[in-house]
Amino acid sequence: MNQFFVVAIAEKISAMETAKFFEHRAATGNAGTAQAAWDKVGSNAAVTDDKWSQ
């Protein structure tokens, strides 16, 4: 029973820390920088010739 509580608490803390991380990133983000990163990705279609796509 104790292990269950420890795991549940650790999961909750992890979720809260993740939410804080993304809130901080969103607050300090820059749309121009984000667009520049997306522009580097390009618009090529995904490669579909691997064994999993058949």
Image (cartoon, grey):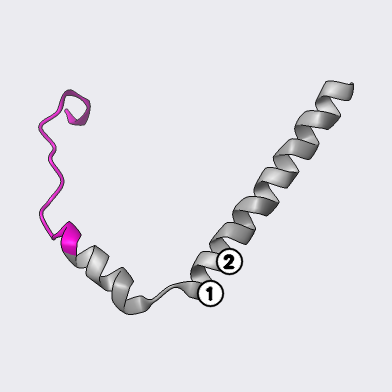
Mark 1 to mark 2: distance in Å?
6 Å
Q: Which residue is mark 1?
A: 27
Q: 51 above or below 35?
A: above
Q: Is residue 12 magenta?
A: no
Q: 35 above or below 46?
A: below
- Please rate how many residues cluster around mark 2, counting C-alpha atoms within 10 Å: few if below 14, some from 14 to 19, many from 20: few
The segment highlighted magenta reads 40-54
* Image-based side of 3 in relation to 50, left or right: right
Q: Residue at x 25, y 64 (%)?
A: 37
Return the residue found at the far right. Answer: 1
What x and y, as percent, mark residue 52?
A: 22, 26
* Image-based side of 22 in relation to 42, left or right: right
* Image-based side of 19 in relation to 39, left or right: right
Q: Nearer the viewer, residue 46 or 16?
A: 16
Q: The C terminus lies in which quarter of the figure?
A: top left
Identity of the amino acid at label 1?
Answer: Ala
Q: Is residue 50 magenta?
A: yes
